[in-house]
Image: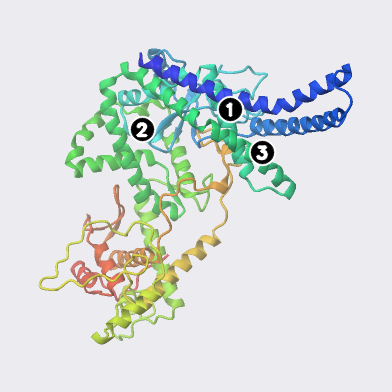
Amino acid sequence: MGVEVGAQTARSRALAVLRIRSRALAVALLPAAVAVVLLVGGSTGHITGGSWPVTRLIVTVLAALVLLAAAGIALVVARARPAVSPTVPIAEASAPDLYRLVRDLADRLDVPPPSAIALTPDCDSWLEDRTHPAHGPPPPEHRDEIAGARGVGGGAGRPRRAPAAPVLVIGSPFLWWMRVGELRAVLAPVVAGTGPSAHPDIAAARRFVRGLDAAVAVTSEPARGPLVRTVLAGVGWVTRLLLRSCRGHAAEMERGVAAAAADRAQAVDYGLRIVAQEQVGLAYAGWDRLLTRVALPAWRMGRWPSRLDAGVVAALTELSRRDRLAEGFASRLGERPACDLLEEPGSVDEAASLLAARLFHGGPAEPGPDWAPVDWQEYPDEVVDRTWRTEAARLHRVLDALGVRHPTDPTQPDQGGPTLARVLDHLTAPATPATDDADLSIDRRAAYGERDTGVSLNETEVEVEAEGEVEAEEEVGEDGEPVLGSERTAALAAGLSAELAREEAATPAVASGPAGGAEQPGPDWSFWDDGMLPLFPLQPPRSGRELLADHVTAMVCCAAMDTAGAAPGLDWLDGPALLVDGVRAADLGPRVLTLVEDGDPEPLRDWLRHLGVRPEKPVRLV
């Protein structure tokens, strides 16, 4: 009963959308109809004399202009390419078991099967209409790189005809974290949506709305000349008016389709679907953590992890060891994972990982000398170690530019080398009389002008261990950020921001796409351009305070590796980690923040003495 109600609601709303299209067509034809009546009346002698000839001429010219404008708008709407989600297409030959699972699921639901399957580097699944001619494969190609399903759509003589059924887009983390039964339960309501989508009225209404949306995007692009801008402005006004008129009906139509699909899927693995929804939330949390903490540092270094989906399993397994609430999730790993439904899961994971780097960071479209893949085993040396030494080198370059001298203690060896002592001495706030504290606070506020819109360096809770001391109220700038320890600390943070901006500006533009057709699975690059990248940036730009804290942390880690035998490591939940005797040093971040924000080096010096780190010794930089 619920299926019929939802389907009827969707169809009634689809008819409302189509009625709006019919009314727009009637408005465009009305002047032409009046002109025809006047012309026929004049030719038959029924409408003659007086001002009728002038009226006939004016109405005829007006009708011609309206028809010309309507034809132009219809042409823009018809030729505009609707937006398509960037995905990794999965051919049926590369995943026959996955296609078989989806078709069996469609048979159980009594709905048409999706025309093809594609993967997206996100924790979501949906149906996507790719029936527009622009979404078909190019004529020279003899294989359907998007659909991957043979025998669907037109024959060999019509290569650009797209299949009528929508494409099933599956989040790639689901395939690696979920078991086969869980994936089937999660996909059941999605695949059930092909039933209402096959109705002619709903399909026509969707094509009309998507065409209007694409036309609005076309009219919003920068034009070349004033005449083109004027024409596109008129087309944009009409399409936006039609889109606003259809918005409510289209939204209700999609809700009806979703309700009908959900009701139809109730009978398929209902109990397992409840459990699988818990895995959806867990996979989302692990995927977000992996991208922001692990993948992002590698992308900034010109490396992209080639097994992100496999990393989700490692991250969530680590979470199950740390969190008692996730203890039961690790026991699932003995069951068959959904990635076994792929013939070559490694190549698919690599393609999805490259697409994730493209979407979330704006990296190049294909690997190269400055954009190379990295395995998880090589991550500590290729990413963590290089990141720390590169940031330490940048820190000393800025210190050189600021004219900061090396320590003058004659007992320290190699006084001209990059040492941690140089950084500590520069960031240590000079002692000032108590009477000058107010003036110093004002100077700090004026010197620190950076805005911090990102995440702090370390989110772990800091326990203040000072006994018998009265905690002073933290100084805060006008933007709500803690004031840095001194003016020269703020100058160093500003210098690091400027240096990093220069390095990013000197980076060459990314490639627009692969040079030739690749046989292995890869993203469908032709559906979106480079000017929009990254589509989904993970984090806002780091503030000067965050940059300084990151660079000081990198310098400390370099000194610990070169003088105390520490090693770079990878924490699946927190990213780069410093390992001391095989154990992660988790208490470094708060001590660095104390130095940066308060100019107090004593907590960090105590930490260095405890580990046997020698700040006066030069470190190796990139």
Residue at 48%, 31% in the rendered image: 248
In the picture, the disc for residue 519 is none
In space, the residues marked 1 and 2 are separated at their CA atoms by 32 Å
Q: Quadrant of the C terminus?
A: bottom left
The local secondary structure at tag 2 comes to helix
Q: Amino acid at mark 3?
A: Val
Q: Amino acid at mark 2?
A: Phe
Q: Are the residues tagged 3 and 2 within 8 Å (C-beta)? A: no
* Of the image marks 1 and 3, the number of the one nearer the N terminus: 1
Q: Is residue 142 visible?
A: no
Determine whether 438 is above or below 279 in the image.
below
Foreground pick, 48 / 226: 48
Residue on which the image places disc 2: 174
Residue 244: x percent and y percent? 54, 35
Q: Are the residues tagged 1 and 2 within 8 Å (C-beta)? A: no
Q: Amino acid at mark 1?
A: Phe
Q: Is residue 442 visible?
A: yes
Nearer the observer: mark 1 or 2; the answer is: 1
Residue on which the image places disc 1: 208
In space, the residues marked 1 and 3 are separated at their CA atoms by 15 Å
Query: Few, some or many C-alpha atoms within 10 Å of disc 1 (few <14, some 14-19, many ≥20)?
Result: many
Residue on which the image places disc 3: 235
